Image (cartoon, rainbow, N blue to C red):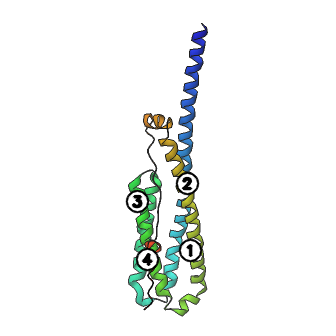
Amino acid sequence: MTTLIVLLVIILGLIGFGVGLYNKLITGRNRYQNAFAQIDVQLTRRHDLIPNLVETAKGYMKHEKETLEAVIEARNRAVSGLQQAAKDPSDPDAMKQLAEAERGLSGALGRLFALAEAYPDLKANENMMQLSEELVSTENKVAFARQAYNDAVMQYNIDRESFPSNLISGWFRFQAATLLEIEDEAKREVPKVSFN
């Protein structure tokens, strides 16, 4: 009888331990999904600012129609990428597509701001200055939200792959989550120094 009670306690302990691991994985998955929702909010804000920015620039940059259209096209690709990634933040293809679309949008915006330098009236326009300031603020919020998301993904993946959690994650098919890396290629380039 005592052996049966000890055996029952051990079995209940193992079941409780397994339930605890399962709940930890669920918590981790919910954390990274919530963190992605914060990125979604900030990127949506960024995407919503861009048409106003382009509309403001149109009045001054009549000869730069191609650049303005490129910004809108890049924005539309980024919106589409965000919608796909929001459906399932654990989908590596969707996250890669989002990162590429956001890189393209950042490049198009960079070209727009570089051209805007040639238009002093546009640079001095109060609406343009306000939109630019809001865009910079939103970019900072996106970077912060992306860091929080990547931290949550890293912790979830560690929990998912660590023993004995990996047994539970394998049985219940917890998929690996993908980091969101929106890197500006220009920031990775090594500056060239010449003393000629």
The three-letter code of the residue at mark 4 reads: Ala
Mark 1 vs mark 4: which is more N-terminal? 4
Q: Which of 154 and 195 is in front in this view?
A: 195
69 to 155, vertically: above or below: below
49 to 5, vertically: above or below: below
Q: Nearer the viewer, residue 121 or 89?
A: 89
Tag 1 and tag 4, C-beta contact below 8 Å: no
33 to 121, vertically: above or below: above
Residues at marks 1 and 2, CA–CA distance in whole angstroms? 24 Å
Residue at image position (61%, 80%) is 130
Residue at image position (41%, 87%) is 64
User: Where residue 96 is drawn, which disc sits there?
Assistant: 3
User: Where residue 108 is drawn, which disc sits there?
Assistant: 4
2 on left or right of 166: right
The three-letter code of the residue at mark 3 reads: Lys
**SS of the residue at dot 2?**
helix
Residue named by callout 1:
135
Residue at image position (45%, 59%) is 83
Q: Where is residue 49 in the image (x, y as percent from the top left)?
A: 54, 73
